[in-house]
Image (spheres, rainbow, N blue to C red):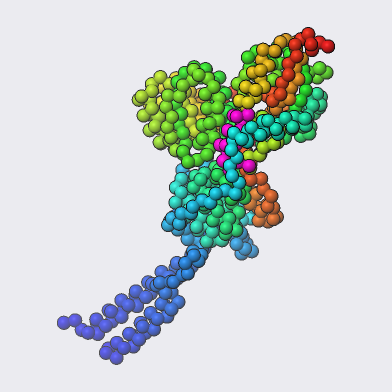
């Protein structure tokens, strides 16, 4: 038995050496090298200081001012004719949406940016119903509390991608709606009268094809003539 | 007296045993398939490894899987990625920024090819996306936004503001222009929380008679909403409605109101379109919600990743709003949980 002792020890030492060579108990790894694939670490990574975004967030007030005073009036000249849109929608609403409208994102409504004139059939605090000469469908101008994104999205002048934070992008809608209320609708509210002719540039959205009658628009420009003047 | 030879035998055997165990352990560990550890918040479909042996892997990192809506979101992205021929692994950040960062560490280290990402925090998650970008991994954000226009490859975001404008209009129709109400907010670091709240208030605040008597975060969590609502009811027993930033909180609020015997008097408004709330609207327990489309967003994101990886597409719109729809008793027949009826 005594003879076996050194043999056993030698065997164990050799086995340990082989094992440790192939499977070291400690593995030295260069800092920053890849972790073992597939092992999900529970350790928190080093916090990084977020670098400033490449695109500075638009200053909403300045942005709205430029949009409202310069870009929107210029774009108004390119608004589609409400007569053309309604005429096409009467026969092929899908085509009217694709030819004259624009969609934002996935599965959303079709936004329309239109200009035209119509005669006031009736009106109240919130809505002004217009007859468009030669068209079967009517137009309803929203003149009460304005909500939603039609003004922001119908013209195609602004993209959500310009805004690092969608909250700012949404604030833009509220600002534009308030401008429409205070600078477009309020000044002409007293001039509205049944039978009067109005000229408008407006933004609307269509979710279903029957939203073309009546077609609801938020006016960004609105001129109302007195019935006596508008009968000429 | 114990014979020496017996001692030698025992000690040698012990050494042998130790090394055998060590060997078995090491071999056992090294023979583990490369892939996420299932005990650490990652859920892989191991059957879908590319037959050619290519490393075509997409990570789906989800803010939390403790909410059925996010489970649908994550599983839809994962399943579409699998259909497109990728190995897909889902990671649960458990609404914990440090867990999310650890997932990114591992996803980057494991050379995933793309990340479909539902962030935990609009600002805090930007650094993770930057790390992935630096490593050359495209990131497609879904549902929740990061506050950056040049870090993610694209962001598919529910149009929460518009959804809550519609919900706000319906709220005024149902509650009237006068009355007290409370609001349960989601996670305060998440843009969705505020887009929903601000969309709702852009309507409701225009009516002076509608007064919000309490507003408190419940972190999009049903149990927390139950507690918060119970607490609110102790100090405000004269409310006619509660607006909740998601459906899980709406269900929590409903439980609290039911417990207080006020479920019939107080109208509850949620957001998400989860299966239980769609059913609750049909049962007239909840007044309305807004249907988001998690499957649409997730599938689109997986297809974007495929376009990027397989077809070299790079010109993705930075942020893409995804339409949402108001769901109420008037149109409940059109909807099922998480989407429209086919």
Quadrant assignment for the C terminus of chain B: top right
- At horizontal 58% and vertical 28% (from top left) the residue drawn is B165
Q: Measuring from the top left, give residue B13's x and y in whole percent.
A: 31, 78
Q: Measuring from the top left, give residue B93's x and y in whole percent.
A: 47, 49
**Magenta region's main secondary structure?**
helix
Q: Most extreme residue toward the left, as rendered?
A: B1
- At horizontal 66% and vertical 45% (from top left) the residue drawn is B317
Task: Give left or right: position of B22 versus A161.
Answer: left
Quadrant assignment for the N terminus of chain B: bottom left
Above or below, comparing residue B234 to residue B145 in the picture:
above
| Residue A169 magenta-highlighted | yes
Q: Quadrant of residue A83?
A: top right
Q: Measuring from the top left, give residue A62's x and y in whole percent.
A: 61, 35
Task: Give left or right: position of B301 versus A215.
Answer: left
Residue A112 in view here: no
Q: Most extreme residue toward the top, as rendered?
A: A228
Q: Which residues are magenta?
A: A162-176
Q: Quadrant of residue B297?
A: top right
- At horizontal 70% and vertical 34% (from top left) the residue drawn is A71
Above or below, comparing residue A25 to residue A170 in the picture:
below
Residue B210 in view here: yes
**Figure label count:** 0
- At horizontal 64% and vertical 18% (from top left) the residue drawn is A186
Above or below, comparing residue A177 to residue B126 in the picture:
above
| Residue A220 magenta-highlighted | no
B136 or B30, which lies in front?
Answer: B136
Q: Measuring from the top left, give residue B39's x and y in whole percent.
A: 44, 55
A56 or A197, which lies in front?
Answer: A56
């Amino acid at each position: 038995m005594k003879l076996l002792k050194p043999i056993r020890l030698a065997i164990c030492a050799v086995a340990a050496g082989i094992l440790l060579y192939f499977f070291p108990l400690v593995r030295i790894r260069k800092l920053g090298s890849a972790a073992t694939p597939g092992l999900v670490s529970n350790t928190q990574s080093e916090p990084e200081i977020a670098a400033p975004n490449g695109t500075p967030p638009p200053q909403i007030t300045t942005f709205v001012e430029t949009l409202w005073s310069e870009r929107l009036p210029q774009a108004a000249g390119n608004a589609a004719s409400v007569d053309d849109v309604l005429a096409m929608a009467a026969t092929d609403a899908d085509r009217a949406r694709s030819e004259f409208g624009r969609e934002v994102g996935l599965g959303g409504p079709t936004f329309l940016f239109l200009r035209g004139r119509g005669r006031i059939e009736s009106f109240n605090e919130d809505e002004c119903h217009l007859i468009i000469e030669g068209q079967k469908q009517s137009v309803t101008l929203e003149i009460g509390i304005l909500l939603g994104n039609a003004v922001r999205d119908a013209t195609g002048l602004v993209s959500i991608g310009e805004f690092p934070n969608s909250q700012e992008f949404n604030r833009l809608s509220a600002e534009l709606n308030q401008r429409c209320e205070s600078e477009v609708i309020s000044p002409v509210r007293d001039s509205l009268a049944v039978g009067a002719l109005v000229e408008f540039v407006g933004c609307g959205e269509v979710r279903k094809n029957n939203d073309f009658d009546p077609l609801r628009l938020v006016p960004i420009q609105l001129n109302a003539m007195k019935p006596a003047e508008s009968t000429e | 007296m114990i014979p020496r030879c017996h001692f030698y035998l025992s000690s040698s055997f012990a050494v042998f045993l130790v090394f055998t165990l060590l060997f078995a352990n090491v071999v056992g560990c090294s023979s583990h398939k490369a892939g996420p550890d299932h005990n650490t918040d990652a859920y892989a479909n191991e059957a879908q490894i590319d037959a050619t042996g290519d490393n075509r892997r997409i990570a789906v990192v989800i803010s939390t899987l403790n909410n059925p809506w996010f489970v649908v979101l994550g599983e839809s992205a994962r399943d579409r990625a699998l259909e497109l021929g990728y190995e897909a692994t889902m990671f649960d950040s458990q609404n914990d920024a440090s867990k999310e960062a650890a997932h990114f560490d591992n996803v980057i280290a494991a050379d995933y090819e793309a990340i479909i990402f539902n962030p935990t925090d609009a600002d805090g998650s930007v650094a993770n996306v930057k790390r992935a970008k630096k490593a050359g991994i495209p990131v497609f954000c879904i549902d929740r936004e990061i506050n950056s226009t040049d870090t993610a490859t694209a962001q598919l975001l529910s149009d929460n503001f518009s959804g809550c404008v519609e919900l706000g209009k319906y709220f005024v129709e149902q509650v009237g222009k006068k009355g007290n109400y409370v609001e349960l907010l989601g996670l305060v670091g998440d843009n969705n929380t505020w887009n929903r709240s601000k969309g709702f208030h852009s309507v409701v605040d225009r009516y002076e008679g509608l007064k919000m008597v309490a507003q408190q975060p419940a972190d999009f969590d049903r149990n927390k909403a139950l507690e918060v609502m119970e607490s609110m009811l102790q100090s405000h027993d004269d409310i006619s409605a509660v607006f909740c930033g998601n459906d899980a909180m709406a269900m929590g609020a409903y439980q609290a109101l039911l417990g207080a015997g006020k479920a019939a008097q107080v109208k509850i408004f949620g957001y998400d379109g989860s299966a239980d709330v769609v059913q609750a609207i049909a049962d007239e327990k909840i007044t309305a919600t807004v249907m988001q489309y998690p499957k649409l967003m997730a599938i689109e994101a997986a297809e974007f990743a495929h376009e990027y990886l397989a077809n070299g597409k790079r010109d993705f719109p930075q942020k893409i709003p995804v339409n949402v729809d108001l769901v109420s008793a008037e149109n409940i027949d059109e909807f099922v949980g998480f989407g429209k009826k086919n």
